[in-house]
Image (spheres, rainbow, N blue to C red):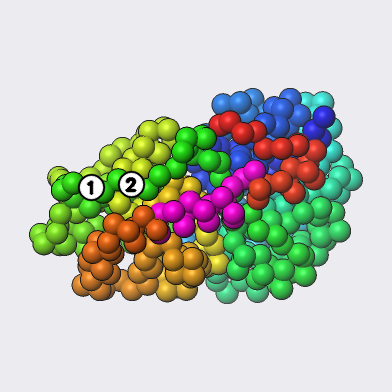
Amino acid sequence: MSKNILYLAENALSPIQGGGIVAYALLRGAPAEQMFGLYSYQSITPAPEYAQCMHLLPRRDGWRERPFRPTFGPGAIVEGPIALNLRRLRALALHFIDRVLGRDTRDAVARIDASGFRPEVVFTAPLTYRMLRLARTLAAHYAVPVVILNMDDWMSEQVGIWGPLGGYIRGAIAGEMRAIAPRVQQALSNSERLAEELTRRYALRHETANNACYDLLRGAPWAPRPPRAGGPVVITFAGALNWHLQGETLVLFSYAVAELAAQRSVELHIYTPWEFAPIANQISIPGKVVYKGFCPKEELVKRYLDSDFLLATTTFDDRNILLFKHSLATKLSDYLCVGRPVISVGHSQWAVHDYVEEHGAGIAIRGRDIGAIKRKLVEAFDWSEEKRAAVSGANRALWSRAHDVTIMGAKAREALDLGRVPAEL
């Protein structure tokens, strides 16, 4: 029998949306009646089999998902420095109030106990100080061990968001890490680089899950894409398009593709959830840059297999790269699984670039100059079929070594008494 798992994360367990994808892969098959989940991102739809045990945390003023950063792009609200700092001070007061009164913990305990659920282990994938503190206090209240998945460097992002108050939040996070460490059975991250950074920073040993994902081909024999007889080179992007994290860079890349299409036969296909349709539609160019909507994973895998290159983007902005600087993109695991060359575009220090280059997985584009982007694409388009097939095969092999959830999730599942990862999706 598996343990009763108390799940705590901003993202609900989800097979298709947000950071809940990796947690879902690691926990899949856990009986819903042995799980109680608390999450805070209202835009995330829980996986159907866990919908009845996922509970939305109450919204707290000052605890916004991205509390203080002005955003730019469609529908943006830009705050001036006075309003920004007033909100920071108000949120700081709420921090102190919550620490003194234990409001979050008290409310969570009341909900858990009212349901009759008795936690035996906490699984947490925090993205904020609030969630880390809640995980620590609930683990202490119920006297249970913890498995923690730090998907990204959310700690540095939180410090950056708080601006002049960043020193306070840095110390608060470090204090919570020290306090939770004795209960941690296993700490995970999504890249070797992030694991090393977090181990050094908090003296809490992190191991690597590398955005563990399932075999998307479900046992079907893998093969490189057959040589394309004519037709365009197809580049496929799939995933979220948050403006300040992926969207702005995808728009820039689409400009490069549109210009290149005047010289070479190339198409950029975009698959993104409905909430990002305004961005995708805004940059669509019939026959060149095409928003293909949103589709189930099974259909998306077919689109991957019919692509020549698969695209991952992140911001070029020094302020916004803090979250992903040391991380491997979740979609990278899917791309490697289907064995297609990868194009990574974004900030020069993004860990995905180093990973792509180290493993010969595709091409890394570290600058935002459109002419330079076009030149890099032309170099890749001119690869021989033999080279493209070799890169594809190496990517599939890399997935099987370092991204297959049946391997990367084994230790975490052992700590949770979940046994082997289910082979079928």
Specify whether residue 283 is in view: no
Is 100 placed left or right of 314 in the picture? right
Q: Is residue 400 magenta?
A: yes
Q: Quadrant of residue 361?
A: bottom left
Predominant SS along the magenta part: helix
Name the residue carrying label 1. 228
> Image point 65% across, 50% down: which residue?
408
Query: Residue furthest toward the right?
Result: 143
Is 262 placed left or right of 17 in the picture? left
Q: Magenta stretch?
A: 391-406
80, 171: nearer the viewer:
171
> Image point 30% across, 51% down: which residue?
308
Query: Residue 11, percent across and down?
Result: 58, 44
Name the residue carrying label 2. 225
Q: Quadrant of residue 370?
A: bottom left
Is 201 placed left or right of 322 in the picture? right
In this picture, is 72 found above or below 212? below
Give the quadrant of the N terminus: top right
